[in-house]
Image (cartoon, grey):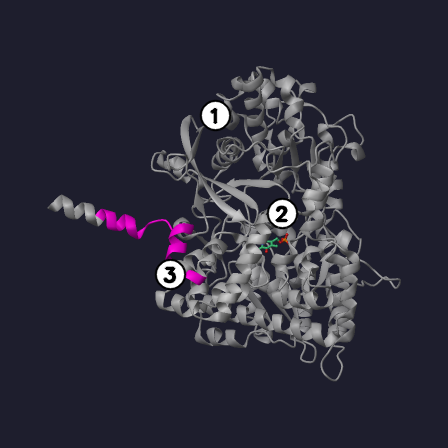
């Protein structure tokens, strides 16, 4: 009897933990709500117009409590509530309409890609590799810009019908959660991702068992399982080593994004690159192009080579060109220290078994990642490997292209800098993800119902001029109020949690005001981004922010890498500033920056501030998101803003402001002084006066003209539809090579 009880107990436990699947969810839902199951399992819902109240309408609190994860929300929704919704004819009609729209979207054959690039087929798609993907806040496997860009890339690829699959890692705990303690110091915590309640499907083999691949890491065989996340038409395959049959250490290989030391780092990159290619093979997918988004995935070129050698019996140098013809590379880092390199010791321990399969000696193999040959201390560089093994390489803005050519000239010593084979495709953002539905609605009215499928059309955006000032202004103000409400709630909660004094907790409810000029600053806190540049002259800053007639307020958000003490000190300084008695309601910092807070910020601010040390911002994309919502950029001329900023005949900006103009020096201290002075001057003499120049009804017409300038000049260019079109025509399409003839590894051997 004892054992019988045990078994039934055990099976109950298993039952409780059973994975939610589309089938179990569909079975749970009342008949007219069944289409919600398919919608919940495809992140496509997150960029539809109807996204706000579709799931939220079922249970507003449940929706927030489960982090806006529709699978978890539907799973936990009460039967009473579901049946209530199922008898509401209006709601049923909405579900039905959206289900039809979804069906149409997924089935559509006449897509942009089918007309422009029919040579890229679903039989041989583009395979996009990245270490992080920022698709929705309920899939927390991203840390920042690189991941968000990758997420936006997949969404536009899907919208345009570009045959694409993607490969990444499914992190058990993702990146860290940020909490600031009472002294303003960042503390990191790690939260388990509830895989069984997420929009993830475990891939199975024909026997119904988990589909796995194997690879050797640290002299052990590691088994890898694969999750599918659907991003519209694009399948994102996420590799996961957390399996009972793996060594406990190997189970944590996919524990954290960018956590751990060099050893974890190389292990993850082996998994992403080599494991990724094996996963595609196990899935029966033969890509025509492998896109390495940043150097992390560059080992994939070696596995493509190994398989080709295995299949043809040829030597590495004979098949090298064939591998190159299928691989393309995007670099994202403008500083040498930002590129992953591994010591030859690490390379030995991870690849000693691998280079013989390529028919290479140790020296020949290590030469693939060496900047300079014949130097025994030269580490193995992932960017170097990618540049050698890819037919095309690009930076992510025009300036970053230049900086990259200069940085990597060392690989091509007999060439002039301008002939280094690295081009550029400037980043963009996914318009439908980042445009607030309230603004999207306005665009539907004035630019056309189909505005969101024509976002690269300059003429269409010119019609923004026809929008009445009052109309755009009230919408903008509502979005600002939404940001203020979000900020107050987050700050209050944080102050409560860290046990601040009662007056500070109460003060959170008075934070910020809708009629005050509102600046946003959100990004990773690291020294080069100079998050505290505004505080160089504290008294001057206090005069600007604390002005009683024309006050200014600012909202900060951002994490600092756990090992970046300098970045953490900047956060601490800002937290200190938030408590300054004369500007208590004018400055706020939102903890734990994520896509949700990001959307509230870029949709609600008047001005987006960005003041990195030039030229360290490869592109930056948050300022682009702001443009789609009528926000105005005030930024150093770095990254994308060099291409975005436009000045009129009087030398003043027509679509935003340029900090420090084009003045630059290698003296950091001097540069900081010049830029801070310029920023103060812009605020005092241009930005504040323009904002407060309002008519009797409080409408700032000249400001709104600038808002419209920001939208109509930037939106048609800095979007991912334009970016994907560039990738398709310049990089992906067979026979294209964005860059000049590259150098073969064989020439180095
Ligand atoms: C857009 C975005 C980023 C990247 O912003 P940058 O301007 O490139 O620094 C980072 N994190 C989140 C949450 C974002 O939405």
Alpha carbons under labels 3 and 1: distance apart: 47 Å
**233 lies above or below 404:** below
The stretch drawn in magenta includes residue 20? yes
Picture quarter with the C terminus: top right
Left or right, 25 with respect to 415, comes to left
Foreground disc of the pair 3, 1:
3
According to the image, label 2 marks what residue?
153
**Could you say which is closer to the camera, residue 603 or residue 378?**
603
The mark that comes first in sequence, 3 or 2, is 3
Alpha carbons under labels 3 and 2: distance apart: 32 Å
Local SS, label 1: helix
Asked whether residue 498 is in view, the answer is: no
**351 lies above or below 537:** above
Q: In the rendering, at what x and y percent does residue 248 appear?
A: 35, 36
Left or right, 638 with respect to 528, comes to right
The span picked out in magenta is 10-32
Contact, CB < 8 Å: mark 3 with mark 2?
no
The mark that comes first in sequence, 1 or 2, is 2
The answer to whether the residue bearing label 1 lies less than 8 angstroms from the nearest atom of ligand 1 is: no
**Could you say which is closer to the camera, residue 55 or residue 241?**
55
According to the image, label 1 marks what residue?
349
Left or right, 274 with respect to 194, comes to right
The stretch drawn in magenta includes residue 734? no
According to the image, label 3 marks what residue?
76
Alpha carbons under labels 1 and 2: distance apart: 35 Å
Q: In the rendering, at what x and y percent does residue 621 appear?
A: 66, 53
Foreground disc of the pair 1, 2:
2
Contact, CB < 8 Å: mark 1 with mark 2?
no
Residue appearing at x 36%, y 33% in the figure: 247
């Amino acid at each position: 009897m004892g054992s019988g009880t045990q078994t039934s107990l055990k099976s109950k436990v298993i039952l409780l933990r059973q994975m939610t699947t589309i089938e179990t969810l569909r079975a749970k839902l009342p008949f007219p709500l069944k289409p919600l199951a398919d919608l919940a399992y495809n992140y496509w819902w997150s960029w539809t117009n109807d996204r706000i109240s579709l799931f939220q309408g079922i249970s507003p609190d449940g929706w927030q409590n489960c982090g806006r994860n529709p699978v978890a929300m539907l799973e936990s929704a009460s039967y009473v509530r579901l049946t209530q919704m199922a008898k509401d004819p209006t709601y049923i009609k909405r579900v039905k309409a959206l289900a039809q729209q979804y069906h149409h979207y997924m089935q559509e054959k006449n897509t942009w890609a089918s007309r422009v690039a029919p040579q890229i087929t679903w039989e041989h798609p583009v395979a996009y590799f990245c270490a992080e993907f920022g698709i929705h806040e309920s899939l927390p496997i991203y840390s920042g810009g690189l991941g968000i860009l990758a997420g936006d890339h997949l969404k536009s690829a899907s919208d345009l019908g570009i045959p694409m699959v993607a490969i990444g890692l499914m992190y058990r705990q993702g990146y860290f959660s940020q909490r600031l303690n009472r002294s303003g110091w960042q503390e990191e915590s790690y939260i388990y991702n509830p895989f069984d309640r997420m929009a993830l499907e475990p891939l199975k083999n024909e026997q119904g068992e988990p589909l796995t691949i194997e690879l050797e890491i640290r002299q052990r065989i590691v088994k890898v399982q694969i999750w599918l996340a659907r991003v519209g038409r694009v399948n994102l395959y996420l590799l996961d080593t957390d399996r009972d049959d793996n060594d406990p250490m190997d189970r944590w290989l996919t524990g954290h994004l960018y956590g751990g030391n060099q050893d974890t780092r190389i292990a993850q990159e082996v998994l992403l690159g080599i494991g990724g290619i094996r996963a595609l093979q196990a899935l029966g997918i033969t890509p025509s192009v492998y896109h390495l988004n940043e150097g992390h995935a560059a080992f994939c070129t070696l596995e493509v080579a190994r398989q080709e050698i295995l299949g043809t019996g040829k030597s590495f140098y004979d098949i090298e060109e064939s591998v190159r013809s299928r691989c393309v590379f995007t670099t994202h880092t403008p500083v040498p220290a930002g590129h992953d390199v591994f010591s030859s010791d690490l390379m030995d321990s991870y690849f000693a078994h691998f280079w013989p399969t390529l028919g290479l000696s140790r020296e020949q193999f290590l030469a693939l990642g060496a900047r300079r040959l014949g130097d025994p201390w030269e580490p193995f560089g992932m960017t170097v490997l990618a540049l050698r093994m890819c037919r095309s390489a690009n930076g992510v803005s025009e300036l970053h292209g230049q900086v990259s050519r200069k940085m990597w000239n060392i690989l091509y010593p007999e060439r002039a800098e301008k002939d280094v084979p690295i081009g550029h495709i400037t980043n963009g953002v996914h318009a439908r993800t980042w445009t607030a539905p309230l603004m999207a609605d306005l665009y539907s009215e004035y630019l056309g119902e189909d505005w969101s499928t024509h976002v690269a059309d300059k003429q269409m955006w010119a019609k923004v001029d026809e929008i009445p000032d009052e109309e755009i202004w009230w919408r903008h103000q509502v979005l600002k109020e939404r940001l203020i409400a979000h900020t107050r709630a987050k700050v209050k909660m944080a102050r409560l949690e860290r046990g601040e004094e009662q007056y500070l907790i109460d003060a959170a409810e008075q934070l910020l005001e809708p009629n005050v000029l509102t600046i946003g600053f959100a990004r990773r806190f690291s020294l080069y981004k100079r998050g505290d540049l505004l505080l160089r002259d504290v008294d001057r800053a206090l005069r600007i922010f604390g002005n009683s007639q024309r006050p200014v307020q600012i909202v900060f958000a951002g994490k600092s890498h756990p090992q970046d003490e300098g970045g953490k000190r900047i956060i601490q300084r800002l937290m200190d500033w938030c408590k300054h008695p004369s500007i208590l309601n004018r400055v706020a910092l939102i903890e734990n920056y994520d896509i949700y807070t990001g959307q509230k910020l870029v949709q609600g601010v008047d001005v987006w501030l960005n003041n990195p040390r030039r030229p360290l911002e490869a592109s930056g994309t948050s300022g682009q998101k702001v443009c789609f919502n009528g926000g105005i950029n005030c930024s150093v001329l770095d990254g994308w803003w060099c291409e975005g900023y436009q000045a009129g005949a009087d030398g003043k900006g027509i679509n935003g402001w340029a900090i420090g103009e084009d003045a630059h020096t290698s003296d950091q201290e001097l540069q900081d002084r010049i830029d801070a002075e310029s920023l103060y001057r812009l605020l005092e003499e241009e930005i504040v006066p323009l904002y407060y120049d309002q008519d009797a009804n409080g409408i700032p017409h000249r400001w709104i003209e600038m808002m419209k300038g920001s939208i109509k000049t930037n939106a048609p260019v800095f979007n991912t539809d334009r970016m994907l079109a560039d990738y398709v025509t310049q990089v992906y399409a067979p026979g294209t090579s964005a860059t000049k003839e590259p150098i073969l590894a064989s020439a180095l051997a």
